Image (cartoon, rainbow, N blue to C red):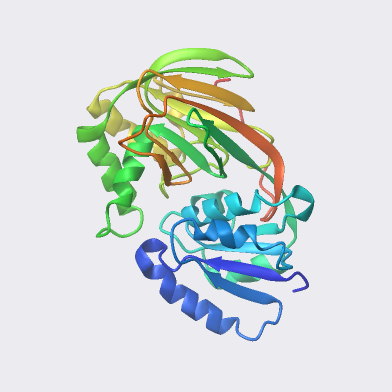
Amino acid sequence: MSTPTLVICNLFANQGAARRSAAALTAAAAGRPRLTWAFSAYPRHAIELARQSADQGFGRVSAFGGDGTVHEVVNGLMQIPAEQRPEFAVIPAGSGNDFSASLGLSREQGEALEYALHSEARWIDVALMKDDSGRSEYFINTLGIGFDAVANLLAHQSDFLPGFSIYLAAALRTIFFENNPIRIRAVTDKQSWEDEVLLFIACNGRREGRLFTVAPQAQPDDGRLDFVAVRTISPPQMLATIPYMIRGDHNRLSYCYQGYFTRLELTADQPLIMHADGEILAGLDSNIRSVTIEAVPRALRAVAPALEPSARAGANA
């Protein structure tokens, strides 16, 4: 290991299970002089820790936790000038670990740590969201609006189910009790359209909720973002759609459509419920009605295996 590396740990990830795995990992890695551990203590603390990393002399920063931790570390790194920005790595320790899966990283944490310390980095993209309140937020995996965000909100409120069961139970509750169609107008660099939808997801990664392959053709290094939208359908149809979303072949369904963009402006007829990388940006008390989403190409040097070429055949542009 030649690059001074900071590992930012979220001990609360995966309902606190990350605390045990962090203890084992730090003990196994004891004595490595160019490896430093930092522990986030409160929401968005990892942003502060990552933002300070360049001034502290770190050339690489690794997020130890789930997609929320990854989200915060990325937002901290993106506040550092590009020429000073440390490289980025992930040690998956959450309940979903969706973006690390898109990067092809091992779920075995000791192996992921060795990879984070010793492997080459390559360029990947991030995405930037701006809403009509003036807020800006980066995301690296997915940004979901509507059904997707409501299910995520419900999953955050569950602390008694393990792993992917949290997301599946939240999705089922949303289907039967919480779904609320919204009419949106979307204008991208490629097209414009208007429709009533149950969900809209902008994707830099391929997967969310641990088991839902929402954008199987997405690549985090292609300079653009993919999207999936689902038109308004009945609860039984929504239930029948879940297996398609898990397999990633929902493009076969007439009410699901996909495409890609580099910049998108979206407006809605009602307040938007919205998440980014699983972090709630606009909840049930939201007054946000419009957002702009754009790709930020080659934003981070990330430690990740090379991904196979993008397979966009079948995506509806």
The quadrant in which residue 120 appears is: bottom right
Q: Residue furthest front?
A: 134
Does residue 10 appear left or right of residue 57 in this picture? Answer: left
Taking the spot 36% from the left edge, 44% from the top edge, the residue there is 152
User: For the C terminus, which image quadrant?
Assistant: top right
Q: How far across and how far down the image is residue 86, in percent?
A: 72, 58
Residue 103 shows up from this direction: no
Q: Nearer the viewer, residue 189 or 133?
A: 133
Establish if 121 lies above or below 229: below
Q: Position of residue 34 (x, y in %)?
A: 71, 77
Number of numbered discs overlaid on the protein picture: 0
Q: Percent x, y for residue 12? A: 40, 65
Q: Is residue 190 above or below residue 138?
A: above
Work out whether residue 236 can be spotted. yes
Q: Residue at x 65, y 32 (%)?
A: 224
Residue in view at x 43 percent, y 62 percent: 42
Is residue 125 shown left or right of residue 171?
right
Residue 26 lies, with reference to residue 144, above or below; the image says below
